[in-house]
Image (cartoon, helix red, strand yellow):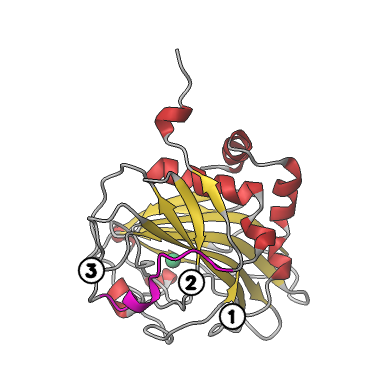
Amino acid sequence: MPSAKMVRIVRDLGATDEDLDRLRTIGDTLESDPTLPFRKTRTGRFGFDPVAMEVRRLEFQPFMLSTEDDFVRHDAGQVRIFDEIRDDLQLNTALQALFVFKFMVFDGMKVEQRPKLDYDSDRWVCTLLNVRTITDGNLIGEPALEGVHSDGVDHTMTTYLGSENMTEESAVTFLHEMDEVNGTRWHDTNPELVRARAQHREFLDTCLIVDHELKHSVSTLYAVDPDRPATRDLLAFLTRRPVAEDHHSHEFDSPAPHPTMPMAVPLRTLDETAPTG
Ligand SMILES: [Fe+2]
């Protein structure tokens, strides 16, 4: 979904111009990442509740992706503790509109089911990641160091916020058939298994992926001026059904609201929003 369309959609869903402006630079407040030196990340857990028709902030829980999720990396299976997303992002009306947009797109959609998720549940759990990838004199930034992978969810949405000093050919997203081997570097993949490629270039360029039907990879971040850092800022919304009891994230899947940073936003369906006549 290209930038111009997304800006129009989120404005229609309540985003103010001031908040759209603030969202461009929200990455400046990122501080650290638990396992990747070329990245800064904050995360927060949110719950889509189609019965109450709202999305709300959920309490903090550690984060884990494992090889069972089609995620092969040195920190796969490791419990990761990220800095928490704060009110400056979760109360931003443009961010809140992105949640509503995402729900409108995936609500009612039939997708290939993942093992060990509870598809009888009404609820959806969404981990929001605010990520800055950095290439500087010492480190090469890899938006997806893990190569070909899945995010271990049902619906992945990535929304681009901006970049500094990034070359035109940097950070291309490739979508691969499920037969592609996990962990394959983006430049070593089988061209016959590449279903599509896309590149986030403008503010709010957005990509939605059915995460258990196609795998993805992202190419390296290169600097135009090698003497200055290059940065690329992104929001990733990873949404899945709650996990079943035998899933590795079962102890990290609480539905309880966040005790100190509450947030709740009403959801809408496409039917409610469709133009009449
Ligand atoms: Fe991913």
Q: Which residue, given by chain and number where applicable, does mark 2 sit on?
A: 144
Distance of label 3 from label 2 (alpha carbons): 25 Å
Residue type at tag 2: Ala
Determine whether the residue tagged by mark 2 lies in a helix, strand or loop.
Answer: loop
Badge 3 crowding class, 10 Å Cα cut-off, few under 14, some 14 to 19, many 20 or more, is some
Q: Quadrant of ligand 1?
A: bottom left
Disc 2 residue lies near ligand 1 with CB under 8 A: yes
Mark 3: amino acid = Lys
User: Is residue 79 found left or right of 9 in the rendered image?
Assistant: left
Pointers 3 and 2 in contact (CB under 8 A)?
no
Label 1 sits on what residue type? Asp
**What label does residue 254 carry, if any?**
none
Residue 269 to residue 89: above or below: above
Q: Which mark is residue 33?
A: 1
Measured as percent of width and height from the top left, residue 126 is found at 44, 60
Q: Is residue 257 magenta?
A: yes
Question: Tag 1, which secondary structure?
Answer: loop
Q: Mark 3 against mark 2, which lies toward the viewer?
A: 3
Q: Name the residue furthest top.
A: 277
Q: Which residues are magenta?
A: 247-259
91 vs 68, left or right, is: right
Would you say the residues marked 1 and 3 are in contact, meaning their CB atoms lie under 8 Å apart?
Answer: no
| Secondary element at image label 3 | loop
Residue drawn where x is 64% and y is 65% of the image: 232
Q: Position of residue 168 (x, y in %)?
A: 63, 58
Residue visible at 59% across and 55% down in the picture = 160
Which residue is labeled 3 in the image? 116
- The mark that comes first in sequence, 3 or 2, is 3
Quarter of the figure with residue 235: bottom right
Residue for point 41% across, 82% down? 73
